[in-house]
C-alpha cells in the first residue's frame, strides 16, 4: 500500500524568500514521486518527477525536490518565491510500472506569497 | 493548440437529474482519467480508460458512468445515484512516454 502525507496545509512566505513544501511518503516498493501545481480553478500541471534516477530532481519555474529514502521524504523547494508561485501544490506517489491508475495524491499545500 | 478541454466550466444539477461533463483531448493520448476533487482532499480517481472502447472503475465509481467511443472523448455522467455530487471534476490524459498527466481546467458541479 502507498500513502503520502503533506505536512502543512498552508505555507506563507514573502516574495524573494525560500520556499519549502514538505512531503513524506510510505510505499512498499521503490516509488515514483511527483509534484503537481494547481492555480485557482485550473487543472494540475506537473512540476517535476522522481523515477529512480538522480535523487535531486529539477523542475519547471525554478523548483526542485530531493528524494531521501532514509527519511521517506520528497520535499519541494525554491530559492526565491515569486508572486506567481501562489497556488496549491500536490505531492503524488505511484508504484512504478503499474500505470497511472495507481497514483495516490496528497491533500495539498496552499502556498501564499506576500509582497 | 493542443490540450484538454472540459465543458462546461460550471454546472448545476437538480435532484434526481443526470448530468454529463464533457472532456475532449487533441493530444492523441490513449489513456484518459476522471478525478474528483473536494476541498482539503487530494484527487480521487473515478474512472479511467486505457484505450478506446475500454474503461475501468477507479476508487469512487459508484454513482458515475463513462463511455469511450472515440479516442478524443471521455464524457462523465453523474447519475442521480450519486448523493453528494458537489465537487470539482478534473479530466486528464496520459503521455506514456513522458509519464506525464495533462489536465483540463475542470468543471465545478453544484447541486441546486
Image (cartoon, helix red, strand yellow):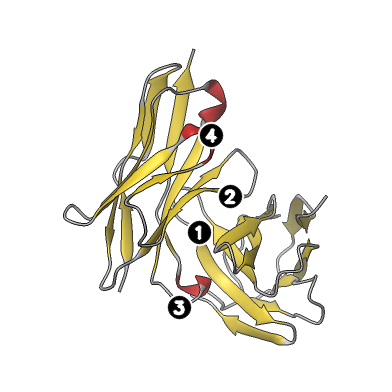
Q: Does residue A97 appear to the left or right of B61 in the view shown?
A: left
The chain to which mark 2 is attached is A
Mark 1 residue crowding within 10 angstroms, few (<14) / some (14–19) / many (20+): many
Image coordinates for residue B95, horizontal then vertical, percent: 63, 65
Image coordinates for residue B55, horizontal then vertical, percent: 65, 83
Q: Is residue B44 visible?
A: yes
Residue to which mark 1 is pinned: B43
Q: CA distance from mark 3 to mark 2?
A: 21 Å
Q: CA distance from mark 2 to mark 4?
A: 15 Å
Mark 3 residue crowding within 10 angstroms, few (<14) / some (14–19) / many (20+): few
Q: Secondary structure at mark 3?
A: loop
- Asked whether the residues under the numbered discs 1 and 3 touch, taking CB atoms below 8 Å apart as contact, a structural biologist would say no
Residue to which mark 3 is pinned: A98
Picture quarter containing residue A93?
Answer: bottom left
A57 and A39: which is toward the camera = A57
Q: Residue at x 58, y 48 (%)?
A: A45
In the rendered structure, which disc, 4 or 3, sits on the residue that comes first in sequence? 4
The chain to which mark 1 is attached is B
Residue to which mark 2 is pinned: A44
In the rendered structure, which disc, 2 or 4, sits on the residue that comes first in sequence? 2
Looking at the image, residue A33 lies above or below residue A110: below
Nearest to viewer (mark 2 / mark 4) = 4
Q: Quadrant of the C terminus of chain B?
A: bottom right
Residue A61 - label: 4
Image coordinates for residue A83, horizontal then vertical, percent: 54, 22
Amino acid at each position: 500500500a502507498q500513502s503520502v502525507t503533506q505536512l502543512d496545509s498552508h505555507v506563507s512566505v514573502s516574495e524573494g524568500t525560500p520556499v519549502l513544501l514538505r512531503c513524506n511518503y510510505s510505499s512498499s516498493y521503490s516509488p515514483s514521486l511527483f509534484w503537481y501545481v494547481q492555480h485557482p480553478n485550473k487543472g494540475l500541471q506537473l512540476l517535476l518527477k522522481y523515477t529512480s534516477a538522480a535523487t535531486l530532481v529539477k523542475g519547471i519555474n525554478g523548483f526542485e525536490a530531493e528524494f531521501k529514502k532514509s527519511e521517506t521524504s520528497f520535499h519541494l523547494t525554491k530559492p526565491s518565491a515569486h508572486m506567481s508561485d501562489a497556488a496549491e501544490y500536490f505531492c503524488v506517489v505511484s508504484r512504478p510500472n503499474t500505470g497511472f491508475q495507481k497514483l495516490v495524491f496528497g491533500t495539498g499545500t496552499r502556498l501564499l506569497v506576500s509582497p | 493548440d493542443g490540450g484538454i478541454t472540459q465543458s462546461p466550466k460550471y454546472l448545476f444539477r437538480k435532484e434526481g437529474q443526470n448530468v454529463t461533463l464533457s472532456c475532449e483531448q487533441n493530444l492523441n493520448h490513449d489513456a484518459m482519467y476522471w478525478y474528483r476533487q473536494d476541498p482539503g482532499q487530494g484527487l480521487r480517481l473515478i474512472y479511467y480508460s486505457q484505450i478506446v472502447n475500454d474503461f475501468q472503475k477507479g476508487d469512487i465509481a459508484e454513482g458515475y458512468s463513462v463511455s469511450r467511443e472515440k479516442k478524443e472523448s471521455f464524457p462523465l455522467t453523474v447519475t442521480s445515484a450519486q448523493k453528494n455530487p458537489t465537487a470539482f471534476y478534473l479530466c486528464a490524459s496520459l503521455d506514456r512516454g513522458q509519464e506525464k498527466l495533462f489536465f483540463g481546467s475542470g468543471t465545478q458541479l453544484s447541486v441546486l
